[in-house]
Amino acid sequence: MLIGLFGRSIKILPLRVLLLTQWFDPEPTFKGVVFARELIKLGFEVEVVTGFPNYPGGKLYPGYKIKLLQRELVDGVLITRVPLYPSHDQSAFGRILNYVTFATAAFIYGVFVAKRSDIIYAYHPPLTVGIAAVCIRFFRRIPVVNDIQDMWPDTLRVTGMVTNTRVLGVVALICSVVYRCVDHIVVLSPGFKQLLIERGVPSQKLDVIYNWCDEAAMVNASGDLPKGFPDKERFTIVFAGNMGKAQALEAVLDAAEIVQSKDSGICFVLIGGGVEVNRLRGLATEKRLTNVIFLPAVPISEIGSVLRKADALLVHLRKDPLFTISIPSKIQAYMAVGKPLLMAVDGDAAELVKAAGCGVLAESENPEAIADAALKLYAMSFAERDSMARRSREYYQSHLSLQEGANRFSVLFKKLL
């Protein structure tokens, strides 16, 4: 409340943010209800426009039914769900229909139904969310901030989702149009920013705001260690997450073979699922690796307690230009837990760990380098590793935390207005 001319009081309304995202809680997402809650704490009024939850299985979550519109109030966050075609299988037609139906419904709601907002925040992927945001902007003249989490069409190519060069070219063209039409773009790494500059996006239109992790799950996690987790006598290096083609974990098994030949007390623990798990298990058996243990995926609410029992945490991706400018989301989780990192990803991810001084670096897909890094961590004193762990937590809090990220978004939103 402010005092205006002639002593009259003027009520200052909170700035309204329309948070446009295809995936939202209870679906797994980086910028979910915790982000919306943090914006509310900072004085914003938030409405989330999203779909009916069906990701990643492509089936509607229990308790939900497709409707023209459904509103929920969760922790003070207004969530508006619009209809979409639920799908997330390998069918290109089903995936496209899933993207297009949500974008169309979000556009109609944003133009004709939604209460006027001061700013639109659009989460990418998929690209169609950005298209919907740009169309709403055209009709309602609301500035748009586009948050780029996946670099399309590069990600489509690397993951094999799209291989047709003509289709990839069309996607690239649409991306350039969206980038030109939005008011500001947020990216998750310096490499993403540089790539967009090379593709013609003005540098002043770009900001790097790092992702955060599920801090409650990492720091306050509870639960027992999974059966088969090594005892305290062994030095455990844990990899937790998806085991697919992009992770290229065969190189880690080769590194484990080198480490085993040196008769060290190191044990590599690979936790999670994925298309490569069975093949990797077979390779470990062929190599007679006694220092590699495979464990099934652990619920997100319990994984923090597992990570805290590790001596070091491993990040690995295959060599690819896209991955050198990416920062895998597990890095934030690892650093929030506060453990030394064995960073076997080249580029921006390695630079982040180097800046924090919280780990040992190794070249991606280089078994000798990974083995040397593991042995280096093993040879360190407890005090040296504890110092790395402390720096890891401190760097997360000052550069990568939810509070830091939300504050930077708050400044950006106000600046655009």
Image: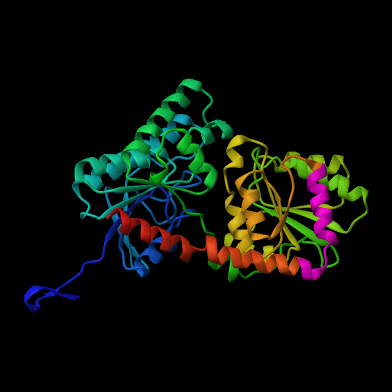
Residue at point 82% right, 61% down? 235
Residue shown at 59% from the left, 49% from the top: 328
Seen in the picture, residue 366 relative to 389 is either above or below; the reply is: above
User: From this viewpoint, is residue 79 visible?
Assistant: no
**Left-right relation of 12 to 254:** left
Q: What segment is highlighted magenta in the picture?
A: 368-384
Q: Is residue 248 magenta?
A: no
In the rendered view, does 113 fall on the left or right side of 218? left
Does residue 376 belong to the magenta stretch? yes
In the depicted view, which residue is nearer to us: 355 or 175? 355
Question: Which residue sits at x=77%, y=67%?
Answer: 384
Q: Nearer the viewer, residue 143 or 263?
A: 143
Residue 103, image x and y in percent?
33, 40
- Residue 225 position, x and y percent, is 71, 66
Q: How is the image coloured?
A: rainbow
Total marks shown come to 0
Magenta stretch, overall SS: helix
Report the front residue among 52 and 219: 219
Furthest residue to the bottom? Answer: 7
Q: Residue furthest top?
A: 166
Q: Where in the figure is residue 195, as x and y percent of width and height?
A: 50, 37
Q: Quadrant of the C terminus?
A: bottom left
Quadrant where the N terminus is found in the figure:
bottom left
From the viewer's perspective, is 408 left or right of 386? Answer: left
Residue found 24% across the figure and 48% down from its top: 142
Percent position of residue 415, x then y = 32, 56
Task: Kindly tell me whether residue 60 is visible in this rendering.
Answer: yes
